[in-house]
Image (spheres, rainbow, N blue to C red):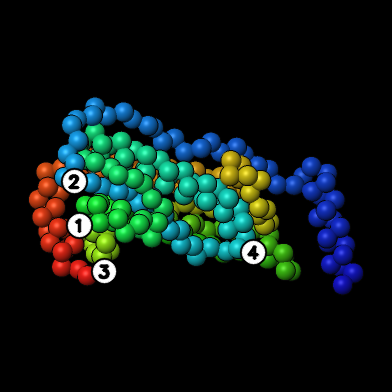
Amino acid sequence: MKKRYILAGALSALLLSGCGPSYVSVKPLDLPSKNYPVTDTDKSIAFAIIKPQLVVKTKISSDLSRGLDARLQHDVNQIACHLTKEMQKMLVARGIDVTQTFDSRDDMTFTQKRETTALLYPQITIELEQHTNTLLNGRMPENTEGEIQIKATTSLVMYEPLSGEKVWVKHLSTKKESVRIDYPGYLQNNASPFQVEERVANVAKSIDNLLVEIDKEILKSVDKFVTKEEFVFLNDDIKKLKNIKRY
């Protein structure tokens, strides 16, 4: 027990002496906003946008999670808000009536669902998996070395609002990346979403870059696939579905 007290005291002294973890600043994601020329709105097609779902699945140590959690949460929120605003501008410019944006389908009233042709709902899954070896000195980590594998899968999904039935799906490409990590000791919590420990700054930067690419890919896919002509054709099937279902 005495040894533990001595070790804790030594660590406290080390941190107080200015030899604690070194943080580096991380800027918000660089997500450009665009303006689109607006055409006449076709009121026969009304879309609502559901705020994109970003799911982060992690198979990483609690140590690494402490070092990245605050930044990851910030990234997820920034991407979701940016995509929602840009998709709305893009669809309006195409002459599609965008009624509203919602956090989820459950936030819509029955009337809103009935009067909406379809819900556009991007879905993104980010997976982080750690493959490392940690050298211990007693019970304390001395060094962690290996890699983090990052995988991102994205889909554009359209739902019929009343039934929740999928009426249209586009699966986009899967992105993968591996990031080398090698750091001594153990990680502290993020100081803020805009600071990470220098030892894992390369991991945070790689995740940031991957999310920016995903954001671009989704907007390009909306631009390519979500056309008024395609949904004029689908609108007939959606109307039939609304009539078949009983609520």
Q: Tell me, for residue 45, which label it has, or none.
A: 2
Label 3, label 2: how many angstroms apart (C-alpha)? 22 Å
Type of amino acid under label 3: Tyr
Type of amino acid under label 1: Trp
Q: Is residue 126 above or below residue 211?
A: below
Q: Which residue is mark 3?
A: 247
The residue tagged with tag 3: helix, strand or loop?
loop
Question: x and y percent of residue 60 in the render?
Answer: 53, 63
The residue tagged with tag 1: helix, strand or loop?
strand
Q: Quadrant of the C terminus?
A: bottom left
Label 4, label 3: how many angstroms apart (C-alpha)? 60 Å
Q: Tell me, for residue 135, which label it has, or none.
A: 4
The residue tagged with tag 2: helix, strand or loop?
strand
Q: Tell me, for residue 168, which label it has, or none.
A: 1
15 or 138: nearer the eye? 15
- Camera-near label (4 vs 3) is 3
- Camera-near label (2 vs 4) is 2
Q: Tell me, for residue 239, which label it has, or none.
A: none
Circle 3 packing at 10 Å, graded few (<14), some (14-19), many (20+), is: few
Circle 4 packing at 10 Å, graded few (<14), some (14-19), many (20+), is: some
The answer to whether residue 203 of the structure is visible from this angle is no
In which image quadrant can residue 243 be found?
A: bottom left
Label 1, label 2: how many angstroms apart (C-alpha)? 15 Å
Question: x and y percent of residue 81 in the render?
Answer: 43, 43
Label 1, label 3: how many angstroms apart (C-alpha)? 22 Å
Question: x and y percent of residue 25 in the render?
Answer: 60, 37
